[in-house]
Amino acid sequence: MASLTLDGVTVRYPDAATPALDGLDLYAGDGQFVVIVGPPRAGKSTLLRVVAGQEEPTAGRVLIGGVDVTAVPAQSRDAVLVFQNYALYPHMSVGDNMSFALRVAGVPDDERRERVFEAARLLDLTDRLDHSPDELTGPQRQQVALARAVVRRPAVLLMDDPLAMLSPDLKDHTADLIRTLVRTLDVTTLHATADPGPLASVADRVLRLDSGRLMEDTAGTGARAP
């Protein structure tokens, strides 16, 4: 668990008239669940990519746990990004998809199994570990993508609107799982979305982003006392 700080972060693209992020300052405390709301092209995904190390800021700093990681490559940061696109390996089982990054990192077999079963329990996947991704529904694949991130036990969990492509009823179900997940793990989480919907009820803070600038920072209805 760790705090997250963006200090004056600016991202400019060569052909763009305005910055994607414009001197953005943001702080998320240890274990906070922060929902970032904004219209298309507000800078939400860019913000997450900067934190994850997939996008280099033109100016400013990113700090995780008070340590400046601006120049640290993505694979060496303790931040994991979950996309709308599940990007599962079709030739691997659900369990193997979840444990792949741990295996590459050299995590011992017993610990890998423990982490996979813990994530599967949290995300209602215990009876699907031997299934292939092709046998799963869309929401179940999204759950696997979340579980694959969770098993890495990151300091910061980043979600790029994983509910966007789900039907309203499935959004509610998956939102319930996300609520359980972030509260159980107590991991610092940023969730970017155009519509906070059911997640607003558990967010510690809801930020409104527009044109790369933070327009509003309010306590969510699920905010915890400091």
Image: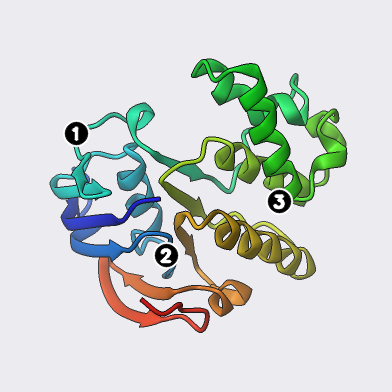
Could you tell me residue 212's position as x and y percent?
26, 63
The front one of 118 and 85 is 118
Could you tell me residue 49's position as x and y percent?
36, 45
The C terminus - image quarter? bottom left
Q: Residues within 10 Å of mark 2 (few under 14, many from 20)?
A: many
The front one of 206 and 43 is 206
Residue 178 in which image quadrant: bottom right
The front one of 76 and 186 is 186
What's the CA distance linking mark 2 and mark 3?
19 Å
In what element is the residue under mark 2? loop
Could you tell me residue 100's position as x and y percent?
61, 22
Mark 3 or 1, closer to the camera: 3
Residue found at the very far front of the displayed protein:
110
Query: What's the amino acid at mark 2?
Result: Gln
Looking at the image, do the residues carrying marks 2 and 1 touch, with CB atoms under 8 Å apart?
no
Q: Residues within 10 Å of mark 3 (few under 14, many from 20)?
A: some
- Judging by the rendered image, the residue that carries numbered circle 2 is 32
Picture layout, residue 41 above or below residue 106: below
Mark 2 or 1, closer to the camera: 2
Query: What's the amino acid at mark 1?
Result: Ala
- Judging by the rendered image, the residue that carries numbered circle 1 is 71
- Judging by the rendered image, the residue that carries numbered circle 3 is 122
The reply to whether residue 15 is visible in this rendering is no
